[in-house]
Image: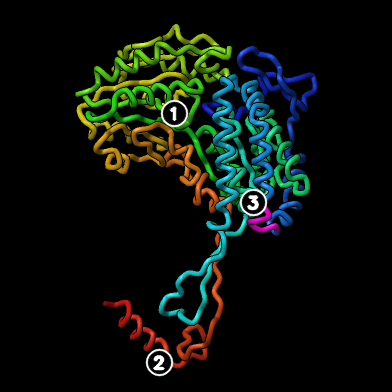
């Protein structure tokens, strides 16, 4: 099994003499920054069992008790931001400020999940309806038990915490399998939780490659939350299907940015370049395609070119972005650039020479065929395709002509909300870029090959619970249809009643 975009690999790229461990590598230098165990199925099952044993006491704390402890964890994370940011930098190669930004979002989401879990999930009354007026009806959202979380390497803290924080706030225990490229980040998160909440060991870690992830799916967890490539997501689903384990799947994207004729072009250009190039383009909701209407396409494309050609990758503090974290992704990026140019596309910035592993310099492509790899497949690198379209209707059509449907961006002063509703994507930012990821109350997720299910917000909290409906008899009524001793006229009277109150 090979790795694509953000999925798991099943064979270590570097191992120690001990076959039961693997090394974590700084992609900027090739330096070994950590060594971690490869957990087999037996060890995974043991950790899931330990998490399950701790979960009941965690659930019994109630919302306020869990909030108190999650707040303690949040405060610890806030106090030691730079320490965790350093681990993120060492394992991903991203600039320090990018890692700090990731952790700012982590802290804010953790606060929202802990503060809002009770309001979203507590038991509430619902209408009993006319036929069951003698019943009290309630619904509440109960924890599943143990959630398995399989995280990615591109945002190794923010993305999995969108599942971990919300699952814990809902009363679950969590067993976390970080990417094999960023196991140290996972270890740090689990260790810091144990430090802040030592009496409730409900966040556990397993590390390894694809086999470890597959073992987690088969270990008896009650649900799996996966973030990674579409190909690996399908394998996760297949493993979970063996025992009907429900899954939440957040996969890749091929997100587009639409520029309308009345757009603020400078703001749109800034957003497009940052959305495409930040984190070396290794962002599932990053901008990979741009559709600019004909009236502004020339001026806008020049703005993109001016901004992109100023950016430089590197491992030093002053670099705009870091290396390609996963070595095999370099070949994907190179193949997409080559295919676009060979099929008549133009390189406005960079080109084939821009791929210099482990770094890729900014690449801006134009006039690329819509069926080329750079338009249809997730590139996951600092590249962007800028296309001219007649009008926004064509832009919407092209944006939706993909099997992905994660995020999108629209720049328009007058029609932003209207255009957003026409896009087949889980999230849309109007006159900004990826803003939806920073709003804790908004659900995050996609459609199509981008996956299903939601993290973040009220939907994200409910994703890690099972709704339970309860009716309780308030008083007896003469017309009881659910009884073999009912009178012959009972159903006739009920039909008459329903026609009277619901048939008009």
Tell me which residue sits at (65%, 13%) in the image: 30
The residue that disc 3 covers is 67
Mark with earlier residue (1, 3): 3
Horizontal and vertical percent position of residue 292: 27, 25
Q: Is label 1 or label 3 in front?
A: 3
Q: Nearer the viewer, residue 241 or 284?
A: 284
Point out which mark residue 342 bears. Answer: none
Say which of 23 and 203 sits in front.
203
Work out whether 27 lies above or below 132.
Answer: above
**Disc marking residue 286:** 1
Residue 340 lies, in percent from the top left, at: 36, 16
Q: Which mark is residue 489?
A: 2
| Secondary structure mainly formed by the magenta segment | helix
Q: Looking at the rendering, in which quadrant would you find the C terminus?
A: bottom left
| Dot 2: element | loop
User: Mark 2 or 3 closer to N-term?
Assistant: 3
Residue range in magenta is 61-66
Q: Residue at x 61, y 17 (%)?
A: 27
């Amino acid at each position: 099994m090979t790795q694509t975009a953000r999925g798991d690999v099943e064979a270590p790229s570097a191992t120690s003499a001990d076959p039961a461990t693997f090394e974590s590598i700084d992609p900027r230098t090739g330096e070994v920054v950590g060594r971690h165990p490869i957990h087999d199925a037996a060890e995974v099952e043991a950790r899931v069992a330990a998490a399950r044993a701790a979960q009941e006491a965690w659930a019994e704390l109630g919302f306020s008790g869990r909030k108190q402890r999650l707040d303690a964890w949040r405060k610890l994370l806030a106090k030691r931001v730079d320490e965790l940011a350093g681990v993120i930098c060492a394992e991903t190669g991203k600039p320090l400020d990018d890692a700090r930004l990731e952790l700012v979002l982590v802290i804010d989401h953790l606060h929202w999940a802990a503060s809002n879990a009770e309001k979203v999930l507590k038991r509430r009354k619902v209408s009993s309806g006319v036929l069951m007026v003698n019943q009290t009806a309630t619904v509440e959202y109960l924890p599943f038990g143990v959630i398995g979380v399989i995280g990615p390497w591109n945002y190794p803290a923010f993305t999995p915490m969108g599942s971990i924080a919300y699952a814990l706030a809902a009363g679950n225990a969590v067993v976390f399998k970080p990417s094999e490229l960023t196991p140290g980040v996972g270890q740090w998160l689990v260790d810091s939780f144990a430090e802040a909440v030592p009496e409730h060991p409900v966040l556990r870690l397993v590390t390894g490659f694809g086999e470890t992830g597959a073992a987690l799916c088969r270990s008896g967890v009650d649900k799996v939350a996966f973030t990674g490539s579409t190909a690996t997501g399908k394998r996760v689903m297949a493993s979970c299907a063996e025992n009907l384990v429900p899954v939440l799947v957040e996969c890749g994207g091929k997100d587009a940015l639409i520029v309308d004729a009345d757009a603020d072009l400078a703001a749109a250009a800034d957003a497009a370049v940052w959305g495409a190039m930040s984190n070396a383009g290794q962002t599932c909701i990053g901008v990979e395609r741009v559709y600019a209407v004909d009236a502004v396409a020339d001026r806008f494309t020049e703005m993109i070119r001016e901004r992109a050609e100023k950016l430089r990758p590197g491992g030093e503090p002053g670099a705009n972005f870091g290396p390609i974290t996963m070595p095999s992704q370099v070949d994907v990026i190179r193949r997409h650039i080559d295919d676009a140019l060979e099929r008549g596309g133009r390189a406005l910035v960079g080109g084939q020479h821009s791929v210099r592993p482990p770094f890729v310099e900014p690449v801006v492509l134009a006039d690329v065929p819509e069926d080329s790899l750079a338009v249809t497949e997730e590139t996951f690198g600092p590249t962007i395709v800028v296309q001219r379209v007649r009008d926004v209707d064509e832009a919407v059509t092209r944006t939706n002509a993909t099997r992905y449907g994660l995020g999108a961006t629209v720049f328009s002063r007058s029609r932003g909300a209207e255009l957003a509703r026409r896009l087949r994507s889980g999230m849309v930012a109007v006159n900004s870029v990826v803003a939806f990821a920073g709003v804790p109350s908004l659900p995050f997720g996609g459609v199509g090959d981008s996956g299903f299910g939601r993290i973040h917000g009220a939907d994200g909290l409910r994703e890690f619970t099972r709704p339970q409906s309860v009716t309780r008899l308030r008083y007896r009524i003469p017309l009881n249809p659910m009884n073999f001793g009912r009178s012959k006229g009972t159903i006739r009277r009920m039909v008459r009643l329903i026609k009277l109150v619901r048939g008009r």
